[in-house]
Image (spheres, helix red, strand yellow):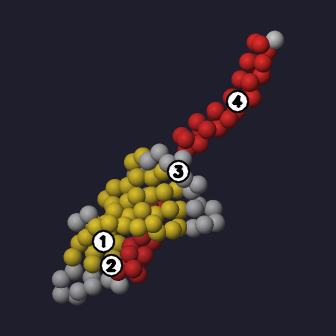
């Protein structure tokens, strides 16, 4: 009788354990982006640069994606190191590297700029 209850409990809880494990595997594990030259990454980086330009009131021009990481989180989270040319001063444009964070809701949420920091 006791053995039957143990089997029943095991059968009841196995789906919950499996679902929790799958959620942890899919939610938030950051990994490197192997091919940083994908057109979609360029689109995400250009979106980030336009948001930085709006917030900083500078004339910034996207140059390239240097490296990146991504994670699944009810969409895709991206952390990208982006090379940007600051053309705010016409006499001395400078190159700046930003680490930007962008969330892409993929389905209907679209892209959301989460923030950035200057690396150099």
According to the picture, the residue beneath numbered tag 1 turns out to be: 84
CA neighbours of label 1 inside 10 A, class few (<14), some (14 to 19), many (20+): many
According to the picture, the residue beneath numbered tag 3 turns out to be: 72
Q: CA distance from mark 2 to mark 4?
A: 54 Å
Q: CA distance from mark 3 to mark 4?
A: 25 Å
Mark 2 and mark 1 residues within 8 Å of each other at the beta carbon = yes
- Between disc 3 and disc 4, the foreground one is 4
Residue 67, x across and y down, in percent: 34, 56
Which badge, 2 or 4, is on the more N-terminal residue? Answer: 4
- Between disc 1 and disc 4, the foreground one is 4
According to the picture, the residue beneath numbered tag 4 turns out to be: 13
- Between disc 3 and disc 1, the foreground one is 3
Spot the residue most to the right.
Answer: 1
- The residue positioned 54% from the left and 53% from the top of the image is 73
The answer to whether 120 appears left or right of 78 in the picture is left
Q: CA distance from mark 2 to mark 1?
A: 6 Å
Which badge, 1 or 4, is on the more N-terminal residue? Answer: 4
According to the picture, the residue beneath numbered tag 2 turns out to be: 60
Spot the residue most to the left.
Answer: 92
- The residue positioned 38% from the left and 60% from the top of the image is 80
The answer to whether 32 appears left or right of 97 in the picture is right
- Between disc 2 and disc 4, the foreground one is 4
Quadrant of the rendered image containing residue 45: bottom left
Residue 108, x across and y down, in percent: 64, 66
Q: CA distance from mark 1 to mark 4?
A: 51 Å
Residue 80 visible? The answer is yes
Residue 74, x across and y down, in percent: 58, 54
């Amino acid at each position: 009788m006791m053995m039957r209850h143990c089997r029943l409990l095991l059968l009841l809880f196995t789906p919950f354990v499996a679902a929790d494990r799958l959620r942890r595997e899919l939610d938030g594990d950051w990994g490197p982006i192997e091919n940083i030259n994908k057109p979609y990454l360029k689109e995400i980086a250009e979106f980030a640069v336009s948001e930085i330009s709006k917030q900083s009131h500078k004339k910034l021009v996207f140059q390239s994606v240097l490296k990146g990481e991504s994670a699944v989180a009810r969409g895709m989270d991206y952390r990208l190191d982006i090379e940007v040319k600051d053309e705010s001063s016409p006499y001395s444009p400078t190159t700046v590297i930003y680490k930007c964070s962008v969330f892409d809701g993929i389905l209907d949420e679209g892209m959301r700029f989460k923030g950035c920091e200057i690396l150099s």
